[in-house]
Amino acid sequence: MSREALAREVEKDSRGGRTVLVIGGSGGMSDRYRDVAEKHGFALRHYETRVPKGVRRDVGKVALVIIMVTMVSHALRDQVHNLGISDAPVVYLRSASVSALRGALEQWEA
């Protein structure tokens, strides 16, 4: 699937409330984070260092926000807070590992 097609799918899925926001973590792990989320039926948006301009109006319905606390700046945390996603549960992870993300999604779905 091309990047453009994948982006369209993520946008479509985000409007249905099956999007997980991963805040912090490692940018090099984005594809692996996405694989884990998709295996659980979620679209994933990963913001490692900043929230891009224009995301506020395009964020859609978010099912879950995961903050990887050991690898997140206060500025990024504040940018996400300003997106107005107050109705989505927030999970804090001490590790930015793929297994920690997998465990959080499995626990949240249970």
Image: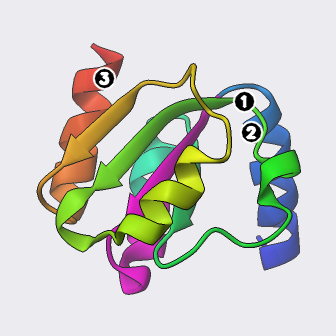
Contact check, label 1 and label 2, Cβ < 8 Å? yes
Instruction: Report whether 84 appears left or right of 2.
Output: left
Between the residue at mark 1 and the residue at mark 2, the CA separation in whole angstroms equals 6 Å
Measuring 48% from the left and 67% from the top, which residue is drawn there? 76
Identify the secondary structure beneath mark 3.
helix
Measuring 58% from the left and 59% from the top, which residue is drawn there? 79
Tag 2 or tag 1, which sits nearer the N-term? 2
Find disc 3 in the rendering and name its residue.
Answer: 108
Mark 1 or 2: the one toward you:
1
Quadrant showing the C terminus? top left
| Start-end of magenta stretch | 18-34
Instruction: Report whether 93 appears left or right of 109.
Output: left
Find disc 2 in the rendering and name its residue.
Answer: 14
- Image location of residue 105, percent across then percent down: 32, 35
Identify the secondary structure beneath mark 2.
helix
- Image location of residue 73, percent across then percent down: 35, 72
Q: Residue 50 occupies which quadrant of the picture?
A: bottom right
Measuring 72% from the left and 30% from the top, which residue is drawn there? 61
Between the residue at mark 2 and the residue at mark 3, the CA separation in whole angstroms equals 18 Å
Mark 3 or 1: the one toward you:
1
Q: Is residue 60 above or below residue 110?
A: below
- Image location of residue 16, percent across then percent down: 77, 26
Q: Residue 61 bears which disc, if any? A: 1
Between the residue at mark 3 and the residue at mark 1, the CA separation in whole angstroms equals 17 Å
The amino acid sitting under disc 3 is Trp
The amino acid sitting under disc 1 is Lys
Find the residue positioned furthest to the bottom.
28
Color encoding of the figure: rainbow
Q: Nearer the viewer, residue 26 or 85?
A: 85
